[in-house]
Image: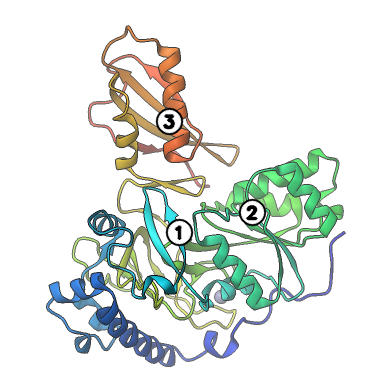
Amino acid sequence: MKREGKDRKKGYFNQEKETRDPEKRKESLEKSLKAIIKHGYKNSKAIKTILDKAGATPDDINTLEDLEKLPITNKADLLDCQKREFPFGGFEAVPLEEIRRIYVSPGFIYEPGEMEYKDTRLAEALFASGFRKGDIIVNTFNYHLWPFSFMLDESLKMIGCTVVPTGPGNTHMQVTIIQHLKANGFIGTPSFLMTISERAEGMGIDLKKDFPLETAFVSAEMLPESLRKRLEEKTGITISQAYATVDLGCIGYECPNKNGLHIPEDVIVEIINPDTGKKVESGAVGEVVVTTFNKTFPLIRFGTGDLSSFMKEKCECGRTSLKLLKILGRTDQATKIRGTFVHPWQTDELMGKFHEVYKYQMVVTRKEHKDEITFFVELKEELVDKVRLKAQIEKMIKEMLNLRGKVEIVPKGYIPEWHKKIEDKRSWE
Ligand SMILES: [Zn+2]
Protein backbone atom coordinates (compact mmCIF):
# COMPACT_ATOMS: atom_id res chain seq x y z
CA MET A 1 0.00 0.00 0.00
CA LYS A 2 1.15 3.53 -0.67
CA ARG A 3 1.76 5.68 2.36
CA GLU A 4 0.07 9.04 2.27
CA GLY A 5 0.29 12.38 3.93
CA LYS A 6 3.62 13.98 3.10
CA ASP A 7 3.96 17.03 0.92
CA ARG A 8 6.88 15.97 -1.17
CA LYS A 9 6.88 18.99 -3.44
CA LYS A 10 7.34 21.74 -0.87
CA GLY A 11 10.27 22.81 1.26
CA TYR A 12 14.05 22.82 0.99
CA PHE A 13 16.92 20.93 2.55
CA ASN A 14 18.50 24.28 3.46
CA GLN A 15 16.03 27.07 2.79
CA GLU A 16 18.31 29.94 3.72
CA LYS A 17 21.04 28.93 1.31
CA GLU A 18 18.87 27.65 -1.52
CA THR A 19 16.68 30.75 -1.70
CA ARG A 20 19.30 33.43 -0.99
CA ASP A 21 20.14 36.38 -3.18
CA PRO A 22 22.49 35.24 -6.00
CA GLU A 23 24.96 37.96 -5.04
CA LYS A 24 25.19 36.47 -1.54
CA ARG A 25 25.80 33.06 -3.10
CA LYS A 26 28.60 34.50 -5.24
CA GLU A 27 30.25 36.01 -2.16
CA SER A 28 30.11 32.71 -0.34
CA LEU A 29 31.45 30.75 -3.34
CA GLU A 30 34.35 33.17 -3.67
CA LYS A 31 35.18 32.76 0.00
CA SER A 32 35.21 28.96 -0.41
CA LEU A 33 37.21 29.24 -3.64
CA LYS A 34 39.96 31.27 -1.98
CA ALA A 35 40.12 28.79 0.89
CA ILE A 36 40.31 25.71 -1.32
CA ILE A 37 42.95 27.23 -3.62
CA LYS A 38 45.06 28.10 -0.59
CA HIS A 39 44.59 24.63 0.88
CA GLY A 40 45.27 22.88 -2.45
CA TYR A 41 48.37 24.96 -3.19
CA LYS A 42 49.82 24.13 0.18
CA ASN A 43 48.89 20.44 0.38
CA SER A 44 48.37 19.04 -3.12
CA LYS A 45 51.33 18.69 -5.45
CA ALA A 46 49.09 18.61 -8.52
CA ILE A 47 47.19 21.80 -7.61
CA LYS A 48 50.46 23.58 -6.92
CA THR A 49 51.77 22.50 -10.33
CA ILE A 50 48.58 23.74 -12.03
CA LEU A 51 48.95 27.19 -10.46
CA ASP A 52 52.72 27.37 -11.02
CA LYS A 53 52.35 26.48 -14.69
CA ALA A 54 49.69 29.16 -15.10
CA GLY A 55 52.06 31.67 -13.46
CA ALA A 56 49.55 32.26 -10.67
CA THR A 57 49.73 32.24 -6.88
CA PRO A 58 46.77 31.72 -4.51
CA ASP A 59 46.62 35.52 -4.08
CA ASP A 60 45.67 35.87 -7.76
CA ILE A 61 42.47 33.82 -7.37
CA ASN A 62 39.88 35.86 -5.51
CA THR A 63 36.76 35.99 -7.65
CA LEU A 64 34.85 33.56 -9.84
CA GLU A 65 36.15 35.49 -12.85
CA ASP A 66 39.75 34.84 -11.72
CA LEU A 67 39.23 31.13 -12.31
CA GLU A 68 39.84 31.77 -16.01
CA LYS A 69 43.51 32.30 -15.16
CA LEU A 70 43.74 28.55 -14.53
CA PRO A 71 43.62 25.78 -17.15
CA ILE A 72 40.97 23.07 -17.44
CA THR A 73 41.99 19.68 -16.05
CA ASN A 74 40.19 16.58 -17.29
CA LYS A 75 40.06 12.86 -16.67
CA ALA A 76 42.88 12.12 -19.11
CA ASP A 77 45.14 14.59 -17.24
CA LEU A 78 44.22 12.94 -13.96
CA LEU A 79 45.03 9.51 -15.37
CA ASP A 80 48.36 10.79 -16.78
CA CYS A 81 49.38 12.19 -13.39
CA GLN A 82 48.32 8.99 -11.69
CA LYS A 83 50.36 6.85 -14.06
CA ARG A 84 53.40 8.90 -13.12
CA GLU A 85 52.63 8.92 -9.42
CA PHE A 86 50.47 6.21 -7.90
CA PRO A 87 47.87 6.23 -6.56
CA PHE A 88 46.40 9.77 -6.72
CA GLY A 89 48.78 11.66 -9.02
CA GLY A 90 49.41 14.29 -6.35
CA PHE A 91 45.76 15.41 -6.33
CA GLU A 92 45.25 14.31 -2.73
CA ALA A 93 45.49 17.20 -0.29
CA VAL A 94 45.58 15.36 3.03
CA PRO A 95 47.98 12.73 4.45
CA LEU A 96 47.13 9.07 3.85
CA GLU A 97 45.96 8.49 7.42
CA GLU A 98 43.16 10.99 6.81
CA ILE A 99 41.85 9.06 3.79
CA ARG A 100 38.97 6.79 4.71
CA ARG A 101 38.53 4.85 1.50
CA ILE A 102 40.18 4.58 -1.88
CA TYR A 103 37.64 4.49 -4.68
CA VAL A 104 38.37 3.01 -8.09
CA SER A 105 36.80 4.18 -11.37
CA PRO A 106 36.95 2.21 -14.64
CA GLY A 107 40.36 2.57 -16.29
CA PHE A 108 41.98 2.32 -12.83
CA ILE A 109 41.54 5.88 -11.68
CA TYR A 110 42.03 6.14 -7.93
CA GLU A 111 40.22 8.64 -5.78
CA PRO A 112 40.77 9.38 -2.10
CA GLY A 113 37.62 9.48 0.03
CA GLU A 114 37.26 11.92 2.92
CA MET A 115 37.17 10.79 6.55
CA GLU A 116 33.94 12.67 7.33
CA TYR A 117 31.42 13.22 4.54
CA LYS A 118 29.96 16.69 5.03
CA ASP A 119 29.01 17.62 1.47
CA THR A 120 25.31 18.52 1.42
CA ARG A 121 24.82 18.74 -2.37
CA LEU A 122 23.26 15.33 -2.76
CA ALA A 123 21.09 15.80 0.31
CA GLU A 124 19.71 18.95 -1.31
CA ALA A 125 19.02 16.97 -4.48
CA LEU A 126 17.40 14.05 -2.69
CA PHE A 127 15.19 16.38 -0.68
CA ALA A 128 14.13 18.22 -3.84
CA SER A 129 13.20 14.88 -5.41
CA GLY A 130 10.74 14.29 -2.57
CA PHE A 131 12.59 12.16 0.01
CA ARG A 132 11.63 13.03 3.57
CA LYS A 133 12.48 12.03 7.13
CA GLY A 134 11.11 8.60 7.96
CA ASP A 135 11.17 7.26 4.39
CA ILE A 136 12.61 3.83 3.65
CA ILE A 137 14.80 3.88 0.56
CA VAL A 138 16.24 1.02 -1.48
CA ASN A 139 19.59 2.08 -2.89
CA THR A 140 20.28 -0.08 -5.92
CA PHE A 141 23.58 1.55 -6.91
CA ASN A 142 26.79 -0.43 -6.36
CA TYR A 143 28.41 -0.25 -2.95
CA HIS A 144 31.75 -1.43 -4.23
CA LEU A 145 34.62 0.40 -5.94
CA TRP A 146 32.67 3.60 -6.63
CA PRO A 147 31.93 6.35 -4.11
CA PHE A 148 28.42 7.16 -5.31
CA SER A 149 26.50 4.83 -3.01
CA PHE A 150 28.44 5.94 0.05
CA MET A 151 27.71 9.56 -0.86
CA LEU A 152 24.01 8.77 -1.26
CA ASP A 153 23.94 6.82 1.96
CA GLU A 154 25.49 9.66 3.98
CA SER A 155 23.18 12.19 2.33
CA LEU A 156 20.05 10.15 3.14
CA LYS A 157 21.19 10.10 6.75
CA MET A 158 21.31 13.91 6.69
CA ILE A 159 17.63 13.96 5.70
CA GLY A 160 16.65 11.25 8.17
CA CYS A 161 15.81 8.46 5.72
CA THR A 162 16.44 4.79 6.40
CA VAL A 163 18.49 3.03 3.71
CA VAL A 164 18.27 -0.54 2.48
CA PRO A 165 21.59 -1.12 0.67
CA THR A 166 20.35 -3.63 -1.89
CA GLY A 167 22.85 -2.80 -4.65
CA PRO A 168 22.08 -3.73 -8.26
CA GLY A 169 20.67 -6.97 -9.65
CA ASN A 170 18.51 -9.66 -7.99
CA THR A 171 15.28 -8.23 -9.30
CA HIS A 172 13.02 -10.75 -7.61
CA MET A 173 14.72 -10.15 -4.28
CA GLN A 174 14.43 -6.36 -4.72
CA VAL A 175 10.67 -6.58 -5.30
CA THR A 176 10.23 -8.83 -2.27
CA ILE A 177 12.28 -6.48 -0.06
CA ILE A 178 10.30 -3.47 -1.23
CA GLN A 179 7.06 -5.31 -0.38
CA HIS A 180 8.23 -6.64 3.01
CA LEU A 181 9.71 -3.34 4.23
CA LYS A 182 7.11 -1.09 2.56
CA ALA A 183 10.04 0.81 1.06
CA ASN A 184 8.67 4.00 -0.45
CA GLY A 185 11.78 5.35 -2.18
CA PHE A 186 14.00 4.02 -4.95
CA ILE A 187 17.50 5.08 -5.95
CA GLY A 188 19.14 3.71 -9.09
CA THR A 189 19.18 3.94 -12.85
CA PRO A 190 15.96 4.58 -14.79
CA SER A 191 16.36 1.30 -16.68
CA PHE A 192 16.64 -0.65 -13.45
CA LEU A 193 13.50 1.01 -12.12
CA MET A 194 11.80 -0.17 -15.29
CA THR A 195 13.14 -3.70 -14.81
CA ILE A 196 11.96 -3.83 -11.19
CA SER A 197 8.50 -2.49 -12.07
CA GLU A 198 8.10 -5.04 -14.84
CA ARG A 199 9.18 -7.82 -12.52
CA ALA A 200 6.71 -6.70 -9.82
CA GLU A 201 3.95 -6.67 -12.40
CA GLY A 202 5.00 -10.15 -13.49
CA MET A 203 4.69 -11.29 -9.89
CA GLY A 204 1.05 -10.23 -9.94
CA ILE A 205 1.48 -6.94 -8.05
CA ASP A 206 -0.80 -4.04 -8.96
CA LEU A 207 1.84 -1.30 -9.28
CA LYS A 208 -0.46 1.59 -8.53
CA LYS A 209 -2.32 0.01 -5.64
CA ASP A 210 -0.03 -2.52 -4.00
CA PHE A 211 3.53 -1.45 -4.72
CA PRO A 212 4.82 0.86 -1.96
CA LEU A 213 7.32 2.93 -4.01
CA GLU A 214 6.30 6.59 -4.24
CA THR A 215 9.48 8.48 -5.08
CA ALA A 216 12.41 7.59 -7.31
CA PHE A 217 15.74 9.35 -7.62
CA VAL A 218 17.55 8.26 -10.75
CA SER A 219 21.00 9.05 -12.11
CA ALA A 220 23.95 7.69 -14.12
CA GLU A 221 21.86 7.27 -17.27
CA MET A 222 19.91 9.52 -19.57
CA LEU A 223 16.27 9.82 -18.61
CA PRO A 224 14.37 10.48 -21.83
CA GLU A 225 11.03 12.23 -21.21
CA SER A 226 9.30 9.35 -23.00
CA LEU A 227 10.68 6.87 -20.48
CA ARG A 228 9.83 9.07 -17.49
CA LYS A 229 6.27 9.49 -18.75
CA ARG A 230 5.83 5.80 -19.39
CA LEU A 231 7.24 4.83 -16.00
CA GLU A 232 5.28 7.44 -14.06
CA GLU A 233 2.04 6.46 -15.74
CA LYS A 234 2.66 2.78 -15.28
CA THR A 235 3.74 2.93 -11.63
CA GLY A 236 2.42 6.15 -10.09
CA ILE A 237 5.97 6.83 -8.85
CA THR A 238 7.33 10.39 -9.05
CA ILE A 239 10.71 10.29 -10.78
CA SER A 240 13.43 12.95 -10.53
CA GLN A 241 16.92 12.87 -11.89
CA ALA A 242 20.28 14.22 -10.85
CA TYR A 243 23.49 14.83 -12.73
CA ALA A 244 26.51 13.61 -10.82
CA THR A 245 29.93 12.14 -11.55
CA VAL A 246 32.14 9.93 -9.42
CA ASP A 247 34.89 12.49 -9.06
CA LEU A 248 32.78 15.61 -8.66
CA GLY A 249 29.63 14.49 -6.83
CA CYS A 250 26.32 16.22 -7.54
CA ILE A 251 26.43 18.91 -10.25
CA GLY A 252 22.73 19.33 -10.98
CA TYR A 253 19.34 18.12 -9.79
CA GLU A 254 15.67 18.50 -10.59
CA CYS A 255 13.23 20.36 -8.37
CA PRO A 256 9.52 19.42 -8.50
CA ASN A 257 9.13 21.56 -11.66
CA LYS A 258 11.37 19.08 -13.48
CA ASN A 259 12.66 21.41 -16.14
CA GLY A 260 16.40 21.78 -16.03
CA LEU A 261 18.93 20.90 -13.36
CA HIS A 262 19.51 23.22 -10.40
CA ILE A 263 23.16 23.62 -9.51
CA PRO A 264 23.50 22.74 -5.84
CA GLU A 265 25.09 25.03 -3.25
CA ASP A 266 28.82 24.90 -2.53
CA VAL A 267 30.15 24.05 -5.96
CA ILE A 268 31.25 26.23 -8.89
CA VAL A 269 29.94 25.27 -12.31
CA GLU A 270 31.11 27.04 -15.46
CA ILE A 271 30.14 26.51 -19.09
CA ILE A 272 33.22 27.00 -21.21
CA ASN A 273 34.30 26.81 -24.80
CA PRO A 274 36.51 23.68 -24.82
CA ASP A 275 38.79 25.21 -27.44
CA THR A 276 39.57 28.44 -25.61
CA GLY A 277 38.94 27.60 -21.95
CA LYS A 278 36.91 30.83 -21.69
CA LYS A 279 33.29 31.16 -20.61
CA VAL A 280 30.69 30.99 -23.37
CA GLU A 281 28.12 33.76 -23.74
CA SER A 282 25.13 33.44 -21.45
CA GLY A 283 22.81 30.71 -22.72
CA ALA A 284 25.29 29.22 -25.21
CA VAL A 285 26.30 25.56 -25.21
CA GLY A 286 29.70 24.53 -23.90
CA GLU A 287 31.53 22.09 -21.67
CA VAL A 288 30.46 21.75 -18.03
CA VAL A 289 33.51 22.59 -15.89
CA VAL A 290 33.37 22.13 -12.15
CA THR A 291 35.33 23.28 -9.10
CA THR A 292 34.67 21.45 -5.84
CA PHE A 293 35.58 22.35 -2.28
CA ASN A 294 36.52 18.81 -1.29
CA LYS A 295 39.52 19.23 1.03
CA THR A 296 40.66 15.63 0.56
CA PHE A 297 40.53 15.68 -3.23
CA PRO A 298 40.10 19.23 -4.52
CA LEU A 299 39.39 19.48 -8.22
CA ILE A 300 39.84 22.93 -9.71
CA ARG A 301 38.21 23.61 -13.10
CA PHE A 302 37.64 19.94 -13.82
CA GLY A 303 36.23 19.38 -17.31
CA THR A 304 33.44 16.81 -17.35
CA GLY A 305 33.38 16.40 -21.14
CA ASP A 306 29.58 16.90 -20.95
CA LEU A 307 27.91 19.62 -22.99
CA SER A 308 25.15 21.81 -21.59
CA SER A 309 24.06 25.44 -21.21
CA PHE A 310 22.68 27.67 -18.48
CA MET A 311 18.97 28.45 -18.47
CA LYS A 312 17.96 32.08 -18.19
CA GLU A 313 14.53 31.78 -16.59
CA LYS A 314 14.02 32.03 -12.84
CA CYS A 315 12.57 28.87 -11.32
CA GLU A 316 9.17 29.01 -9.67
CA CYS A 317 10.23 26.61 -6.92
CA GLY A 318 11.93 29.48 -5.08
CA ARG A 319 15.48 28.18 -5.46
CA THR A 320 17.65 30.98 -6.78
CA SER A 321 20.51 28.86 -8.09
CA LEU A 322 21.33 28.75 -11.77
CA LYS A 323 19.95 25.86 -13.76
CA LEU A 324 21.59 23.72 -16.41
CA LEU A 325 19.61 22.55 -19.36
CA LYS A 326 19.81 18.77 -19.72
CA ILE A 327 23.08 17.22 -20.86
CA LEU A 328 23.24 17.68 -24.60
CA GLY A 329 26.16 15.43 -25.51
CA ARG A 330 29.86 14.90 -25.08
CA THR A 331 32.91 16.83 -26.21
CA ASP A 332 34.78 13.62 -26.95
CA GLN A 333 33.71 10.20 -28.16
CA ALA A 334 33.23 8.79 -24.67
CA THR A 335 29.77 7.34 -24.29
CA LYS A 336 27.79 6.48 -21.21
CA ILE A 337 26.30 3.02 -21.42
CA ARG A 338 24.16 1.63 -18.62
CA GLY A 339 25.72 4.15 -16.27
CA THR A 340 29.33 3.45 -17.25
CA PHE A 341 31.56 5.58 -19.46
CA VAL A 342 33.26 3.82 -22.32
CA HIS A 343 36.17 5.70 -23.91
CA PRO A 344 37.75 4.91 -27.30
CA TRP A 345 41.09 4.17 -25.58
CA GLN A 346 39.34 1.44 -23.60
CA THR A 347 37.88 -0.25 -26.67
CA ASP A 348 41.29 0.02 -28.38
CA GLU A 349 42.93 -1.66 -25.43
CA LEU A 350 40.27 -4.39 -25.49
CA MET A 351 40.55 -5.14 -29.20
CA GLY A 352 44.36 -4.86 -29.08
CA LYS A 353 44.32 -8.12 -27.15
CA PHE A 354 43.12 -10.01 -30.23
CA HIS A 355 45.75 -10.16 -32.99
CA GLU A 356 43.14 -11.67 -35.35
CA VAL A 357 41.18 -8.40 -35.41
CA TYR A 358 41.77 -6.11 -38.38
CA LYS A 359 39.24 -3.39 -37.63
CA TYR A 360 36.30 -2.87 -35.27
CA GLN A 361 33.47 -0.53 -34.43
CA MET A 362 31.35 -0.48 -31.31
CA VAL A 363 27.73 0.49 -31.91
CA VAL A 364 25.34 1.48 -29.12
CA THR A 365 21.62 1.12 -29.69
CA ARG A 366 18.57 1.24 -27.48
CA LYS A 367 15.83 -1.35 -27.35
CA GLU A 368 12.83 -1.02 -25.06
CA HIS A 369 14.61 1.62 -22.97
CA LYS A 370 17.73 -0.49 -22.50
CA ASP A 371 21.19 0.11 -23.94
CA GLU A 372 22.69 -2.60 -26.11
CA ILE A 373 26.22 -2.78 -27.45
CA THR A 374 27.50 -4.62 -30.48
CA PHE A 375 31.10 -4.84 -31.63
CA PHE A 376 31.38 -5.25 -35.38
CA VAL A 377 34.68 -6.92 -36.09
CA GLU A 378 36.59 -7.44 -39.32
CA LEU A 379 39.30 -10.12 -39.33
CA LYS A 380 42.76 -10.13 -40.85
CA GLU A 381 42.14 -13.62 -42.20
CA GLU A 382 38.96 -15.56 -42.65
CA LEU A 383 40.43 -18.82 -41.46
CA VAL A 384 40.15 -18.44 -37.70
CA ASP A 385 37.64 -20.27 -35.51
CA LYS A 386 35.02 -17.54 -35.49
CA VAL A 387 32.72 -19.06 -32.89
CA ARG A 388 35.55 -19.38 -30.42
CA LEU A 389 36.96 -15.91 -31.12
CA LYS A 390 33.50 -14.36 -30.75
CA ALA A 391 33.08 -16.00 -27.34
CA GLN A 392 36.56 -14.90 -26.24
CA ILE A 393 35.95 -11.27 -27.20
CA GLU A 394 32.54 -11.26 -25.50
CA LYS A 395 34.15 -12.57 -22.32
CA MET A 396 36.83 -9.86 -22.51
CA ILE A 397 34.17 -7.14 -23.00
CA LYS A 398 32.55 -8.25 -19.75
CA GLU A 399 35.91 -8.27 -17.96
CA MET A 400 37.34 -5.02 -19.26
CA LEU A 401 34.29 -2.80 -19.71
CA ASN A 402 32.10 -4.40 -17.07
CA LEU A 403 29.28 -4.51 -19.62
CA ARG A 404 27.65 -7.24 -21.61
CA GLY A 405 28.13 -6.84 -25.34
CA LYS A 406 27.59 -8.85 -28.50
CA VAL A 407 30.21 -9.46 -31.16
CA GLU A 408 29.38 -9.77 -34.83
CA ILE A 409 32.08 -10.87 -37.20
CA VAL A 410 31.58 -9.06 -40.49
CA PRO A 411 33.28 -9.33 -43.90
CA LYS A 412 36.10 -6.97 -44.81
CA GLY A 413 34.81 -3.63 -46.04
CA TYR A 414 31.68 -3.72 -43.85
CA ILE A 415 32.96 -1.01 -41.48
CA PRO A 416 33.27 2.33 -43.32
CA GLU A 417 36.75 3.68 -43.98
CA TRP A 418 36.24 6.83 -41.89
CA HIS A 419 34.48 5.42 -38.90
CA LYS A 420 34.08 6.43 -35.30
CA LYS A 421 35.32 3.74 -32.94
CA ILE A 422 32.20 4.23 -30.83
CA GLU A 423 29.01 4.99 -32.73
CA ASP A 424 26.10 6.07 -30.58
CA LYS A 425 22.86 5.36 -32.43
CA ARG A 426 20.52 5.84 -29.48
CA SER A 427 17.66 8.25 -29.71
CA TRP A 428 16.42 9.84 -26.52
CA GLU A 429 12.85 10.80 -27.26
ZN1 LIG B 1 13.26 24.84 -9.29
Q: In this rendering, which labeled residue sits more in front, label 2 or label 3?
A: 3
Judged left or right of residue 272, residue 13 is right
Residue that numbered label 2 is attached to: 140
Q: Estimate the spatial distance between the alpha carbons at disc 2 and disc 1, rounded to whole Å.
A: 18 Å
Judged left or right of residue 6, residue 253 is left
**Amino acid type, callout 3:** Met
Q: Residues within 10 Å of mark 1 (few under 14, many from 20)?
A: some
Judged left or right of residue 2, residue 350 is left
Where is residue 375, by image quadrant?
A: top left
Judged left or right of residue 215, residue 312 is left
Among numbered discs 1 and 3, the one appearing first in the sequence: 1
The x, y position of residue 256, in whole percent, is: 63, 71
Residue that numbered label 1 is attached to: 103
Q: Estimate the spatial distance between the alpha carbons at disc 2 and disc 3, rounded to whole Å.
A: 25 Å
**Amino acid type, callout 2:** Thr
The x, y position of residue 101, in whole percent, is: 48, 64
Outermost residue, front side: 97
Q: What secondary structure is marked by label 3? A: helix
